Image (tube, helix red, strand yellow):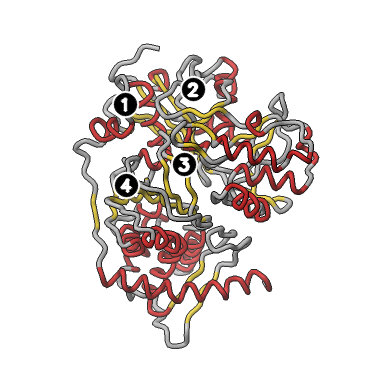
Amino acid sequence: MKHNQNSLSLGIEFGSTRIKAVTVDGQFRPVSSGDYTWASRFEDGVWTYDLDSVWTGLKQALSGMKDRESIAAMGISGMMHGYLAFDAEWNLLTPFRTWQNTITAQAAAELTELFGFNIPQRWSIAHLYQAVLNGEAHLEKLAHITTLAGYVHYMLTGVNAIGIGEASGMFPIDSEKLCYDETMLEKFNAHVAARNLPWKLIDLLPRVLPAGENAGQLTAQGAALLDNLLAPGIPFAPAEGDAGTGMTATNAVAPRTGNVSAGTSIFSMVVLEHPLGKVYEEIDLVTTPTGKPVAMVHCNNCTNDSNAWVGILKQAAQLFGAEPSTAELYTKLYETSLAGDADCGGVLVCNYMAGEGVTHMDAGRPLIARRPDSRFTLANFFRAQLYSTMATLKLGMDILAREHVTIDSLTGHGGLFKTPVVGQKYLAAACNAPVTCMQTAGEGGPYGMALLASYMLRRAGGESLEDYLNTRVFAGIEGSTLQPEQADVDGFNAYIKHYRALLDVERTAVAVI
């Protein structure tokens, strides 16, 4: 397909709450966007999405976008991890098991010990092995496992392959060979050999591709799934996870850089210079879209509870005839929190709507706790709400600090950073590192995927993704950087001391409520 500076690159992301599409032009400026709101459902003990809504939502996100005929490259991104199991004809064998589930504790623990490598509960291999331990009937028909992005990519292109960053959330990656770790594949096969399963693990997994590779093109069948909103023939970049698109959108793919994505979930990605000293259950080891090792702290819970409280406070305003817009209400509450005490005045919040792997909880019960002598003001209450969105993340980032992992720059993106300064200031305090936000802070994922599609389309020769982002995409783009203030660092450290104690209350609440 011919392209010029007017050609567009399309990024599509299947996020937790929205399916989003963004096009960028040859100067990497967003041109058009569309979205569709959806939500996971808790059915029969499993968090899932209906795959029919994948196509309903994708078509709606695309339908309002302009200049679709100018799209010269595209790519699919989505929530990482989870379990989508198919037979040889790509018929779904079980409901989609999302990253939100904490139903694989036994599998994750056994595999971590077997591999000497942390396998979190939400990883695809943990879901597969848990199904093996459970003796699930679908394993006899199993031919493919993939991620949400991998599934959509296959349906549109007929190519069963995913980007290396996305693959690193399915099974451990060898960053030298840019493929699944062969030693661990052999260990897994030997470990389950006595069960006489009718497949080998490598045959179930999608192929691995680094950023910049061509990963197929939109087929006529794929275009038909989209009601021909896009023309067949558009080349696809490798499908990537939301972690990889977040790193790309924030120019954080080089060693000593990192980013924090904060929305329904919150996670940090720090590109490593050297291996960690030991295995930590709180730290995932994944990769950049080009295969460099990354330390990831992933927390299931971020803004869901604070979003619920914003809704309650809006109802309170409506009792008096006020009708503040949701955006205005968020801005006012975020800004009000700045007047709170650095340690939130003794007000504590645990925001766990779902289980949390970092703190080893399989379920959540949102809590507010305070001592009788606490300073219970709106500012302290909402500051505690915002601290709670990143408190569990801090527990993991403190491990990296003790491992002497150097972070020159940390970039924040996602909904938590849409209100200027506030989330940025608190994250700088939590991580004791400078935090930068760019203009794309609210919409990192689909923008990052569009950049990866652009990189596939426009890179020159062996131009690295790091050089492409530094010299072409982000050259001259200014962000706002906040240094951590010592009073905030001390206040957050005081808060986290009491937060650790609050987690004992949370465990009791999960057990008895």
Q: Earlier in the sequence, mark 3 or mark 4?
A: 3
| Distance from Cα at disc 2 to Cα at disc 3 | 18 Å
> SS class of the residue under badge 4?
strand
Label 2 vs label 3, nearer the camera:
2
Indicate the amino acid at tag 3: Asp
- Residue lying at 48% horizontally and 80% vertically, measured from the top left: 370
- Residue lying at 28% horizontally and 20% vertically, measured from the top left: 5
Label 1 vs label 3, nearer the camera:
3
| Distance from Cα at disc 2 to Cα at disc 1 | 21 Å
Indicate the amino acid at tag 4: Thr
User: Would residue 313 appear left or right of 48 to someone viewing this image?
Assistant: left
| Residue for badge 3 | 242
Vertical position of residue 350 compared to residue 188: above or below: below
| Distance from Cα at disc 3 to Cα at disc 4 | 17 Å
| Residue for badge 1 | 25
How far across and down, in percent of the image, does residue 427 sit? Answer: 35, 60
Q: Furthest-bottom residue in view?
A: 373
| Distance from Cα at disc 2 to Cα at disc 4 | 27 Å
Determine if residue 63 is in view.
no
| Residue for badge 2 | 215
How far across and down, in percent of the image, does residue 494 sit? Answer: 38, 75
Neighbour tally class for label 1: few under 14, some 14-19, many 20 plus, Cα within 10 Å: many
Neighbour tally class for label 2: few under 14, some 14-19, many 20 plus, Cα within 10 Å: many
| Quarter of the rendering occupied by the N terminus | top left
